[in-house]
Amino acid sequence: MDCVRRRGKIYSVVVTVPADLIDVVGKKQLWRSLKTKSYDVARSEARQLLHTVEQLFKQIRGGMDSRLINGMVAEYALDWLNKTDATRTFFAVVNNTKEKRAAKSARYQDYTESVQDLILSGTSAEVLGAVSVA
């Protein structure tokens, strides 16, 4: 997505304010951190945020009071952060169980052994990233 940018290791969303609303909003662009290092998560969260921003732009064009708009933005941001934090906490717990760690460790061990077998068999050209020396 064009609106998802990476600042350091964390993704942010950038929304360009329509020209007719720049005076009302007071900015040409809105930057919000998505507080994630995962591009897939950032894209998903950016879509949700963009939808909400578009709705706010429509409401601003409809003549809403700026205090009401600021209140709605603050309420949405708090709700969004709570949902995001709850989701991340859930997946952190799920992915950090002993069973998950053991399964990941076993997969890595199997992969390492298969790569070693390929290298020792002399077919290192089949190993991803390997360079054959002539």
Image (spheres, rainbow, N blue to C red):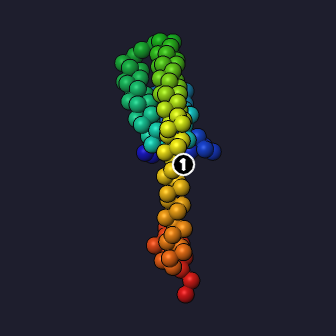
* Res 8 seen here: yes
Residue shown at the point (50%, 40%) measured from the top left? 100
Depth check: 9 or 23 in front? Answer: 9
Please determine whether, in this image, residue 95 is positioned above or below residue 131: above
* Res 25 seen here: no
Quarter of the image where one finds residue 8 = top right
Please determine whether, in this image, residue 132 is positioned above or below residue 89: below
Depth check: 113 or 94 in front? Answer: 113
Query: Are there few (<14), some (14-19), or many (20+) residues within 10 Å of tag 1?
Result: few
Residue shown at the point (40%, 31%) measured from the top left? 48
Q: Secondary structure at mark 1?
A: helix
Please determine whether, in this image, residue 65 is positioned above or below residue 106: above
Amino acid type, mark 1: Ser
**Residue wearing tag 1:** 105
Point out residue 34 in the picture as x, y percentages from the top left corner.
53, 34
Point out residue 134 in the picture as x, y percentages from the top left corner.
55, 87
Residue shown at the point (45%, 34%) measured from the top left? 45
Depth check: 34 or 111 in front? Answer: 111
Work out which quarter of the rendered image holds the N terminus and state it. Answer: top left
Residue shown at the point (61%, 44%) measured from the top left? 9
Quarter of the image where one finds residue 10 = top right
Point out residue 11 in the picture as x, y percentages from the top left corner.
55, 40
Point out residue 116 in the picture as x, y percentages from the top left corner.
54, 68
Residue at the limit of the structure toward the bottom, as seen here: 134
